[in-house]
Image (cartoon, grey):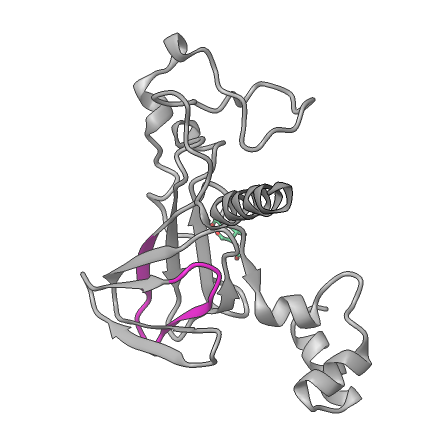
Amino acid sequence: MKTSSFSFHFFLTLLSLLLTIVKPDPDPLQDYCVADRNNPRSIFINGAPCINPSLALPSHFATSALSKPGNTANQFGFNVTLTTIANLPGLNTQGLTIARVDLAANGVVPPHSHPRASEVTICLEGSILVGFIDTSSHMYTQQLRVGESFVFPRGLIHFLYNMDPMKPAMAVSGLSSQSPGAQIASLSMFASKPAVPDEVLKKAFQITGQDVAKIRRNLGG
Ligand SMILES: *[C@@H]1O[C@H](CO)[C@@H](O)[C@H](O)[C@H]1NC(C)=O
């Protein structure tokens, strides 16, 4: 009897832990929790502390952060501008981020993943080849034209590529976390600090030490 009630409790605990893991950001306990940008970070909590709700202003829920294109003059030809609790404090605890993705002609957002968010993207300018790879290494890809959308499931590696050699492209994404995180696969592997050991990269990618050195150089590692 004792054992079975113990294992039942164990099962419940495990279940609630698993449910916590698959949940998006924690639910807000009030209508809103406008991030207090002046509060020095002396205590660390999951999210940012809120200002007194009676001091909330319409402007806390608005931002022009995404109104201008980001500068795409870098080696990949892309720039991602994000809403954050600094430029849009009303998003605090709402489990949301908006991203503006600017792509130069033939620019790419290199394969990357967001460990804490699913993403839905809409092409607003140009045409964009998008794709993600699932955990069975199956790739799902699509060419988006203006007005068309695509979903990148949570945590899966994905990319956006502007196939047009002449014209820029632009997309806007919604992400299901106020802190989605972004890990660019190539930079994680070849430009980390400290560096991933050469031997690991040589074996993992089946390349030579010279290849490793070259890719590191190319990526600023
Ligand atoms: C993105 O654009 C902003 C604004 O133009 C610029 O400050 C930033 O350096 C750019 N980021 C990259 C990676 O080029």
Residue 220 placed where, x, y %?
A: 69, 68
Position above or below: 167 against 209: above
- The quarter holding residue 75 reads bottom right
Q: Is residue 153 visible?
A: yes
- The quarter holding residue 218 reads bottom right
Residue 40 placed where, x, y %?
A: 64, 21
* Stretch in magenta: 153-173
Q: Is residue 5 magenta?
A: no
Residue 133 placed where, x, y %?
A: 44, 75
Residue 78 placed where, x, y %?
A: 45, 63
Position above or below: 136 against 76: below
The answer to which of 98 and 22 lies nearer the viewer is 22
The answer to which of 81 and 10 lies nearer the viewer is 10
- In the figure, is residue 92 to the left or right of 126? right
Residue drawn at point x = 75 percent, y = 91 percent: 208
Position above or below: 1 against 37: below
